Image (cartoon, rainbow, N blue to C red):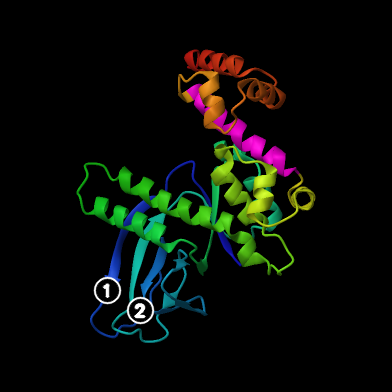
Amino acid sequence: MDYIKMNIEKPANYISGGRFVTNDKWQHEKRTIDSYEMIIGVNDILYIEQDEIKYEVKPGEVLFILPDSSHRGYKTCSKHVSFYWFHFITDEIAAGKTLNNTEVLKIRTNPETSRSIKDIYFPVYGQLVAGERLNILANQLLDVDNSNYYTRMSMNYLMTSLLIELSEQTFVHSSKRETLISENDININEILEWTRINAFEGISVSDIADRFNYNKDYLSRYFKKKTGKTLQSYIHALRISKAKDLLVGTRQNIQVIAQRVGIDDEKYFMRLFRKYEKMTPTEYRKAFVKTHLNRK
C-alpha cells in the first residue's frame, strides 16, 4: 500500500471544499490539477481513474488525487453518488512511503513520541476505520468555510486536523491492513489501544490478560517479543507521560496527580516517577517552571 507522508510543522493550506451531490447520472471530467484533492465517499460509488489506476470509492473510503496527476471518471456514476472533496497544498509532502508494522509499534508503545512527531502518514486509497469522525470534521471545515471568518487560517488548521485524524486511524489499525492475523495470533494493536484508553483506571497486566482471555505470563512474553518492551513498562510509560503533563499544566498536588493516572499509592507513584525521570515529581515541576520562565 502506498502512503502519503506529510510534515505538519506548518498546517496544510486549504483551498476549497464541498460535498458533491447530484440528481442525475454523472461522470467525472478528465483533468489535471496542481493541488491535492482528498475525496471521502459518502453514498454509492464514485468511479475514478488516476494515472491509469481505476478506483471505486465507496462510502467510508478515502482517495487522494495527487498534484499534476491525470484523473477522470471511467464509468458513469448513479444519480445517488455523493462524496466530500477538499483541495489543499502543503510545503512538504511525499507519496510512496511504506509504513511497516515495526515502525507503527515503536511509535504506539512510546507515548513520549507524540510530543515530537512532525510527520503524519495516510494511504493514497483506503478504507476508513471510523468514517463518522472524519465526516464530523469535514462538516466543521465546510461550516467554517461558509462562515466568512476574517482569517482563513482556521480552515488551514481544520484541514490539517482532518488529515491528522486519518493518520491516527492509519496508525492504530495498520496491522489489520498490512498483515493477516490468524485465530492463534494476538492483535497487539488492539491491546495497545485498549491499554492506552484504560491506563488511568488502575488496570494491571492481569486485567489486560483477562480482558483478552490470555494467560498473563504468555501475554507478557508475547508483548515483549513483538514490541521490545514489557506490557507493564508500557502501562508505566503512559502514566508517567500523563503525570508530566499534569505536573506542568495544573497546580494539583502529587497525591491527586497520582490518582488521576491510576495509582492510589502516592509513595509508589513517586518511586516510579523517579525511576523513569531520574528526579521526583516536585523537582520535575520546579525544573519546568524555571525553564519556562527563563525562556526567551
Q: Residue at x 52, y 31 (%)?
A: 260
First along the sequence among labels 2 and 1: 1
Residue 31 position, x and y percent, is 38, 74
Residue 87 visible in this rendered orientation of the protein: yes
**Image-quadrant location for residue 3:** bottom right
Position of 95 with respect to 148 (left or right) is right
The answer to whether the residue labelled 2 contacts the one labelled 1, judged by CB atoms less than 8 Å apart, is: no
Residue 104 at x, y percent in the picture: 65, 52
The residue singled out by tag 2 in the image is 28
Q: Who is closer to the viewer here, 200 or 249? A: 200
Nearer-the-camera pick, 161 or 118: 161
At x 61%, y 31%, the residue is: 240
Q: Which residue appears at 29% of the width and 66% of the height?
A: 19
User: Magenta residues?
Assistant: 229-248
Residue 97 visible in the picture: no
Label 1 belongs to which residue? 21
Mark 2: give few (<14), some (14-19) or many (20+) Cα within 10 Å: some
- Horizontal and vertical percent position of residue 252: 47, 20
